[in-house]
Amino acid sequence: MPPMFETVGLIGKPNHSGASESLRILYNFLIAQGCRVLVEERVANELEQEKLEVRDLVSIGKEAQLAIVVGGDGNMLGAARVLSRFDVAVVGVNRGNLGFLTDIAPDDIERQMKAIFAGKFNSEERFLLEVEVHRHGEVKSSNSAINEAVLHHTKVAHMMEFELYVDDMFVFSQRSDGVIVATPTGSTAYSLSGGGPILTPNLDALAIVPMFPHTLSSRPIVVDANSEIVLKVSNDNTENLQVSCDSHVMLAVVPGDDILIRKNPSPLHLIHPKGYSYFNVLRTKLNWGSKLY
């Protein structure tokens, strides 16, 4: 019987001994399952194998049915922005710190992978954001984000002025350090540190979280994820700003620009080992209390 996932991509955290060890375990497991294995070009040398099929992320997305990301949430975010464009399932092995998105433990890889290949897994879709910087009516730059898009100053502790519109409706003008627009996936990341709400992944919603606003009445807002959000950067700002996507990709912004943020039509297909519980992840990662009885 052919394996459930015939072609599998291996994506990893380069130059990390723990991640390299997990990649070798996964490679041997997949070969034993009879899989065709595509290895991301950044980590191919760490497997110390001959005749590897080495690919970039786009090729893995096009050819694989399953992609396994070994590393932390940062590695998953970088891979997810590319893999979400393709019909490929994604699962993560945690070799980072928090591991909200990479939920297979390094010491439990073979057991968890055997269960996944036996069809014992949960699957879900997480939506991404599409971010565009408009200047004089033209798109100057764009990218996607799975956690959040953040408008901020290029210098620390500098305020800016901007206006927020949701579906062409004016919401507020503000002087602040910036604003975070977060997906449910990103609600436990930077947005949480900024005082934003936790949104469960099944919600079709966005959190808009002001960063150190110069008013006591400003509060986070939760809006429909199908809304079109526009941030109009005031011409009164004297210096350049940035929009960051997942803290990885920086888009330059100048006074007078508009930033358009909306749901990306291509979702990320995540799979989790059977028994996965989002609330268990929150309890574990955020050190919440357990049941009393």
Image: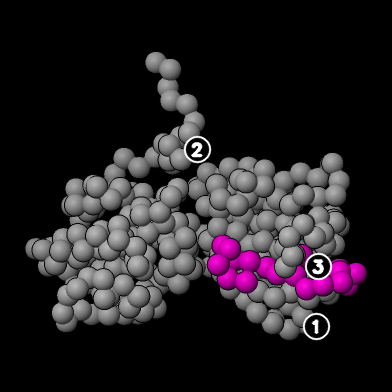
Q: Secondary structure at mark 1?
A: loop
Q: Secondary structure at mark 2?
A: helix
Judge whether 244 appears above or below 126 on screen.
below
Task: State which mark lies toward you, 1 or 2.
Answer: 2
Picture coordinates of residue 224 (x, y %)?
65, 53
- Magenta segment includes 35: no
Residue, disc 3: 232
Asked if the residue under mark 3 is in contact with the one under mark 1, i.e. CB atoms within 8 Å, the reply is: no
Q: Amino acid at mark 3?
A: Lys
| Pointer 1 or 3: first along the chain | 1
Disc assigned to residue 136 = 1
Alpha-carbon distance for marks 1 and 3? 12 Å
Q: Amino acid at mark 2?
A: Leu
Residue, disc 2: 286
Image quadrant occupied by the N terminus = bottom left
Residue at figure coordinates x 74%, y 65% from the top left: 155
Q: Amino acid at mark 1?
A: His
Q: Which residues are magenta?
A: 230-250
